[in-house]
Amino acid sequence: MGIRVIACIVVCCLSIFQEEVASQRVYTVNDTTTLQRDMLANYDKKQRPQSQTNLLLEFGLLHITELDIVTQRLFSMGFLLIDWKDDRLQWTPSNYGNITASMFRLSDIWIPPLVLSNAADELKILGDNSDFASSPVYVASTGDVVWMAPASFVAQCTVNIKYYPFDSQSCKLVVSSWLFLEFMIDLGAMSQTINLDIYEEHGEWEVTGTSVTNRTRSISGYQLAAIDFTLELKRKYSYYLLNMLLPVIILATMAPFVFILPVESGEKISFALTILLSLSVVMTIVSDNIPPTSTHICVLSVYLLMTFILCSVQTLVTVLVCRVHELHNKTYIMGTTCKKTVRLLAKLTKYRRRPRGDALSEVKDVHGIKETQVVSQEKIDLPKSKGTAWAENETDKPEDDSIDEHIEYTYEDMVIMSEKFNFYLFTVLTLLTTIICMIILETNGGESVK
């Protein structure tokens, strides 16, 4: 009894399976040919499928070719996935070998006229090219049409060079319908982000974020639907740090060392001019890599300009120092103003002149205390005091100001003091300028144009 029941169940299952296989025949080439011939027999590809055609768009980025900040153009390769419904392309699958979808040629059916509104090279309709005429379009039996349109996009991108080369940029690709108003062709987004599934990383720019926004553009009072595909890009600054910023910082730091170089070497002017010319070359390179716009001022250009001004002033001061040294060689005598200036420099630089070569040093032992006396052939009238100026364990010392007033400084002393003062002054100014500019570049480098 049990065997008969099992046999009946098996027979029923086999019969049901045979009927299912019969209903799901594998379609042939003839079925596909017949389907497309019937669908296109009375099809007019010049007419829209409906009074209002709703398009769903998705942008996929393959790779970024280049972001030229001088011409402010973004070169990219990608595809635009477009989905719409065409009721004229509906069929019953059972009549055509259960075919639920088929590939039609792009040139055989109606496609929406879409353009890249912010194109930087030329404005052309997407797919209006003989190279895409034979590309396939996916059509389902329900009338849903899916077209993946590959293209090379060249879009205008307003760049912000304020924090170059630590800058971030925001570039948009604006896709809109051409001539058809919003109530004729409406655009919508499939996703809120750009498709990066097969994106290849760029060597200079990093994609930090993407967004998709629907918008309506008004032209002479007529409303046109559009979609903004936005790319947030951040520059990889390692190359610029090693090949541009560090050389500039090193040059700026080396410039104050011209005041340490002795005048007698004869290379002070050459050293200063070499630094100045090197900065001029770097400024030329930077100016060639940024767009000629006044919307944003590049912080790096301001830093280079300030450094160039400092180096120019250092070169001018070096020339004056060499001229003062020449006055010493010609045994010129200082005037009253020069003497006051030298005494002020002596106080600022803590300068103490060494005894002259014709001075004689003498050490005496008075009551167990060693005294060092300088006996010079040149008499200097110093105020009387208890003990001498170099006495060890001395309680009462003469005031420095009273001594400085009786010291006769020469132009050579003036050169030494001014060199020391200028070295410290320009070193501090250079370091402050460099540190402030680098902090501004690094902390605000993420700012981009919205």
Image (tube, rainbow, N blue to C red):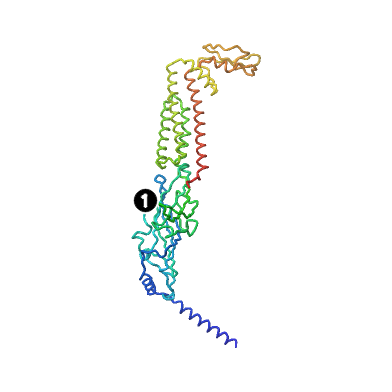
Q: Residue at x 37, y 53 (%)?
A: 123
Nearest the camera: 92 or 222?
222
Nearest the camera: 376 or 361?
376
Within 10 angstroms of label 1, few (less than 14), some, or many (20 or more) residues? few
Vertical placement of residue 250 versus 201, above or below = above
Q: Report x, y in % for residue 81.
A: 44, 60
Q: Residue at x 41, y 42 (%)?
A: 291
Nearest the camera: 96 or 312?
96
Label 1 element class: loop
Q: In the image as oriented, which residue stretches furthest toward the left?
A: 130
Q: Report x, y in % for residue 300.
A: 46, 39
Vertical placement of residue 81 versus 247, above or below = below
Q: Name the residue that disc number 1 marks.
A: 121
Q: Is residue 37 left or right of residue 16?
A: left
Q: In the image as oriented, which residue stretches furthest toward the bottom?
A: 1
Amino acid type of the residue tagged 1 in the rendering: Asp
Q: Report x, y in % for residue 391.
A: 61, 17
